[in-house]
Image (cartoon, grey):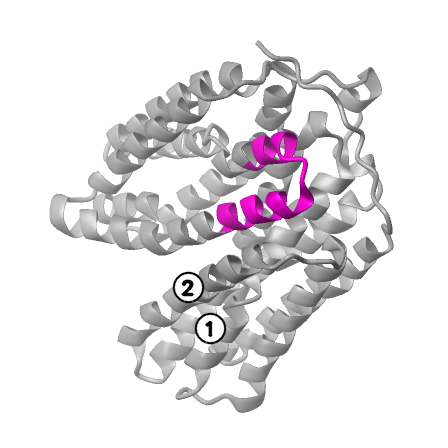
């Protein structure tokens, strides 16, 4: 959002801002898992410090070239996305490697999800606040400060110096691991929902002369998820992660389709909150399921690919739903959202077949 604020203000072009934002997201999705693989192999500290430094320089370059050169602006937007540290992946990997008790690990992953949702709620609001008070550059400058603090802090508290798997594990792709491909594909479909929800909700609000309320409705989506994440973390679940993942997606499918059934602008806010409640449980279960499926030596890469899958879905979802809404109207956009969650649910059924998962435990080498 900070990138959109900057470019749309300096260049007066939302098209260019959208292109730069897509470059940022897609390059992060492509390069992020490869950086995660390096972190698995050589250790978080060795990888995170230089990546944080390069990312900071890239964002500074975005600010510098925003009014000078469009090609260089797009280049450094892409580099910023490619080098953005995947903090959630690194912290989830740390929890997964250090916490052996499954209940305590569930609480830790729930906490991570709650913090993510808090960032999704607070981040855009903070960016808008800084933009209005201090100008178009300030949100990205603040982003640099937060990234450096987070990157350096996570790096200096890291205890691992890398984990060595067998040669085939390092060379072979994660997608060769059974059920991982189905999980990632399901998460791409879930990303379609995330990418389309703000487009569709804002379109419906505008069509019904409630444009001022549209932003509030969008903000309710992660708030419902945040509350659900807190509740999810305190419950001692006995069901399997794959089962909980599928049930959370099914719940989101039903609550999203209910909006289509009623199509009432006065009740839409309740169904938005209801649908958002399923987000955190789905993501927490997906992270825990991935941890069960993938060897410990490849968790940074795996969690980065999880985030990349969602990012790809978000990029596609915002584009496809935008075209659909422009052609057919806002309410029809909920058909797209319902279809996305239904597809994610159907794909998740494959993961249930995983049965009892066995993770290949490997020893962390300390430095």
Question: Which quarter shows the C terminus?
Answer: top right
Q: Is residue 100 magenta?
A: yes
Answer with the quarter of the image where residue 279 lies: bottom right
Q: Label 1: how many residues lie within 10 Å, few (<14), some (14-19) or many (20+)?
A: many
Please state which of residues 244 and 312 is positioned toward the viewer in this rendering. 244
Answer with the quarter of the image where residue 38 lies: top right
Query: Can you tell which mark lies on residue 273?
Result: 1
Separation (CA) of disc 1 from disc 2: 8 Å
Does the residue at mark 1 contact the one at mark 2 (Cβ under 8 Å)? yes
Instruction: Please indicate whether residue 195 sits to the left or right of residue 306 in the image.
Output: left
Specify the segment rendered in magenta: 92-113
Instruction: Please indicate whether residue 185 sits to the left or right of residue 23 in the image.
Output: right
Count of picture labels: 2
Residue 81 position in % (x across, y down): 46, 34
Residue 97 position in % (x across, y down): 64, 30
Q: Label 2: how many residues lie within 10 Å, few (<14), some (14-19) or many (20+)?
A: some
Earlier-in-chain disc, 1 versus 2: 2
Residue in view at x 67 percent, y 35 percent: 100
Q: Is residue 136 above or below residue 341?
A: above
Answer with the quarter of the image where residue 20 lies: top left
Q: Is residue 356 magenta?
A: no
Residue 258 position in % (x across, y down): 58, 83
Please state which of residues 237 and 332 is positioned toward the viewer in this rendering. 237
Query: Can you tell which mark lies on residue 57?
Result: none
Residue in view at x 83 percent, y 20 percent: 168
Residue in view at x 49 percent, y 62 percent: 225
Say if residue 33 shows up in the picture: no
Residue under numbered circle 2: 223
């Amino acid at each position: 959002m900070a990138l959109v604020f900057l470019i749309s203000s300096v260049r007066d072009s939302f098209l260019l801002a959208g292109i730069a934002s897509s470059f940022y997201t897609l390059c992060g999705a492509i390069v992020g898992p490869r950086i995660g693989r390096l972190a698995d192999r050589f250790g978080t500290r060795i990888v995170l410090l230089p990546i944080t430094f390069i990312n900071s320089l890239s964002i500074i370059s975005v600010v510098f070239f925003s009014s000078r050169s469009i090609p260089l602006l797009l280049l450094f937007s892409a580099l910023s996305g490619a080098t953005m540290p995947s903090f959630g992946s690194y912290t989830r990997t740390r929890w997964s490697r250090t916490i052996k008790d499954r209940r305590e690990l569930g609480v830790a992953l729930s906490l991570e999800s709650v913090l993510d949702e808090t960032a999704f709620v607070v981040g855009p609001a903070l960016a808008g606040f800084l933009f209005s008070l201090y100008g178009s550059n300030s949100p990205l400058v603040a982003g640099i400060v937060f990234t450096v603090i987070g990157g350096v802090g996570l790096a200096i508290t890291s205890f691992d110096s890398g984990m060595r798997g067998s040669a085939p594990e390092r060379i072979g792709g994660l997608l060769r691991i059974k059920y991982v491909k189905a999980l990632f594909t399901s998460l791409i479909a879930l990303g379609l929902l995330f990418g389309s929800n703000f487009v569709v909700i804002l379109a419906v609000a505008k069509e019904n002369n409630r444009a001022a309320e549209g932003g509030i409705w969008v903000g309710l989506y992660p708030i419902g998820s945040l509350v659900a994440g807190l509740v999810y973390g305190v419950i001692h679940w006995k069901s399997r992660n794959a089962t909980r993942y599928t049930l959370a997606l099914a719940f989101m499918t039903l609550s999203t389709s209910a909006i289509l059934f009623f199509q009432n602008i006065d009740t839409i806010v309740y169904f938005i909150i209801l649908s958002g409640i399923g987000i955190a449980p789905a993501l927490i279960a997906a992270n825990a399921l991935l941890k069960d499926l993938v060897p410990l030596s490849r968790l940074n890469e795996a969690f980065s690919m999880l985030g990349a899958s969602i990012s790809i879905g978000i990029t596609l979802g915002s584009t496809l739903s935008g075209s659909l809404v422009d052609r057919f109207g806002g309410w029809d956009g909920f058909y797209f959202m319902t279809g996305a969650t239904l597809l994610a649910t159907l794909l998740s059924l494959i993961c249930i077949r995983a049965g009892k998962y066995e993770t290949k435990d490997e020893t962390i080498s300390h430095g």
